Image (cartoon, rainbow, N blue to C red):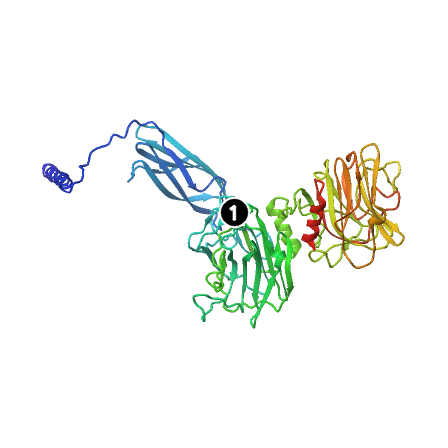
Amino acid sequence: MKLINKFFLFLLLTGLTLGCEREGIDPISPVDPGPDQESPMVEISYPLEGTVIQVLEAVTTVTIKFEATDDIELAEVVIDFDGAQIASFKDFLDYRRYVGEYPYDQVADGTHTITVTGTDTNGKSGSASVTFTKEPAYTPVYAGEVLYMPFDGDFIDLVNIRQPTVVGSPGFAGESVVGLDAYKGAEGAYLTVPTDGMLGTEISAVFWMKVNATPDRAGILVIGPPDAANPDAPNNRTSGFRFFRENAGGEQRFKLNIGTGAGESWFDGGDAADVIPDTDDWHHFAFTISADYAAVYIDGQVVKDGAFDGVDWTGCDILSIMSGAPRFTGWSHLSDQSYMDELRIFNRALSQSEIQEIIVTESGGSIGYTPKYDGETFYLGFDNGEFQEMVSGQMMTVVGSPGFAGEGKVGGNAYAGATDSYLTFPLDGLAGNEFSAAFWMKINAMPDRAGILVVGPPDPDNPGAENVRTSGFRFFRENAGGLQRFKLNAGNGTADSWFDGGTNADVEPDTGEWDHFAFTISGSECVVYINGEVAAQGAFDGIDWTDCDMISIMSGAPHFTGWSHFSDLSYMDELRLFNKALTQEEVNQIIADEM
């Protein structure tokens, strides 16, 4: 029998060789692979280093994905889990490359190490290792949280431990705000999940995006009904909501549309809702819907809000993520190719302070505010109902009972002064060779003198009436024949210099108008601006910060009270500090931007 088999094999090979020659094809000949010089190379594609897995089960399955290659020939690939071998592979169709997967079903809570080792036919080996963690089942961090997608190498919703329906080929960004990864949009790609448990009289969504300009319009989050009349371009807006973006002069404008059953309501903030795309910056987005009110937030700030009749959910059974498809494509709001991270859905309307708390937590101490101007180190917008500095995310120290005006030059609110009330903030990171401040005020005539911004040293010799002026600065106002005159005093270490513009620095109080103030300090001069015009200017030897540890806002207290410059009862809005001396052109640009 062996002889017969060999005879048939000989005939077959001879026939193939002659056939190749008859067809003009070169006969098969062996190629010397050369000397075996390299050790095998191994790459593990899942799990990644630092991957965190959260499922309901105490013991779960992890599919280990890997690739092993060799310059000559692989002999064996083995997988070790926490030091013990769990799998071995020896049969390879491609003897130089093996791409494999192995589902390991004994992964318990804790930190684990996977090592994949490839060995070639000469005994040389190479390996790769990753460490990952299986955590206990996810417990919602925030009240009312009904969906959470961290996008850390998976599209799983951790609240419900479910995979979404994946349409097209969305991917992962290789970067994130929180965790290991983020969603990466692709043309024709998006996710959907059922709306079970989401729909009630209130709903909120929060997430981060790194905004891509292409395409120049896209759907982001959509819960909408079918549109039987327009199956190829659905645009039924009488129920559910649509959160999307569109080109606005090269920027991207974010809009919310909500169906009320009988009609629809629009929340379009115009310029306030514009974001510059392709900047490599992450921005935070949120919207809230209650029974009679809706609001859109960008980086923790309200960009549009208002009353409406309440959302209707008729026919709304799916949530689309990163596309308007399949229910909102009539205006070409298709797949968003931006990055998205940390998507959370709530069955209640979040407050602004709750949204900002999420931002602070997820961004590691910053509320997601990106300074708008070169050298901007500090920003108080007063729109969040709290005295929170936006660059650092830190809360101000509040003395007394300052309030909020219920109006603002920019946004919906401003600081409202009160007797014996002011804010303080540490000077760390704010003091340098140059310094500037810019802000708006609606001036109250009473009291007829007050401190506005003060950085000064303690005066232990005069408690309750402190007035050491050899370091730091003092910006304040005083009565001038019924007007209010604004003055700057700055210390150079041995003495103080005055920048008093006289009548040029006078402003009429109690007019109901907002006026803009700014001052700059450099190593050679100080300038005071009122409504963008120079009110006082002069040479200066350079500021000294000896013993200055905090800035007081809307009072001279505690370090500049010797001349009764106490709390200012005026309104203040849009306070910005800088580590540079602004030019007049830059001051006027800020004014123009905030008008």
Measuring from the top left, give residue 329's x and y in whole percent: 47, 63
Can I make out residue 342 in this image? Answer: yes
Q: Is residue 145 visible?
A: no
Q: Residue at x 57, y 71 (%)?
A: 263
Give the camera-side residue of 585 and 168.
585
Residue 100 in picture, x, y percent from top left: 36, 42
Work out which quarter of the rendered image holds the C terminus and state it.
bottom right
Amino acid type at image mark 1: Pro
Q: Nearer the viewer, residue 485 or 577?
A: 485
Pinpoint residue 95: horizontal percent, then vertical percent. Answer: 29, 36
- Name the image quarter holding the N terminus: top left
- Does residue 586 appear left or right of residue 130 in this picture? right
Q: Is residue 171 above or below residue 36?
A: below
**Place of residue 544 in the rendered image (x, y in percent of width and height, measured from the top left):** 78, 34
Query: Mark 1 falls on what kind of element?
Result: loop
Q: How many marks?
A: 1
**Above or below — where is 239 with respect to 402?**
below
Side of 577 where 207 appears, left or right: left
User: Residue 119 sits in which quadrant?
Assistant: top left
Q: Residue at x 30, y 33 (%)?
A: 73
Q: Splitting the image into 4 quarters, where does residue 270 fall?
A: bottom right
- 348 horizontally vs 533: left or right: left
State the residue at coordinates (89%, 38%): 462
Rendered view: 463 above or below 567: above
The 10 Å Cα crowd at callout 1, few under 14, some 14 to 19, many 20 or more, is some
Along the line of sight, which residue is nearer the eye, 542 or 50?
Answer: 542
Label 1, on which residue? 136
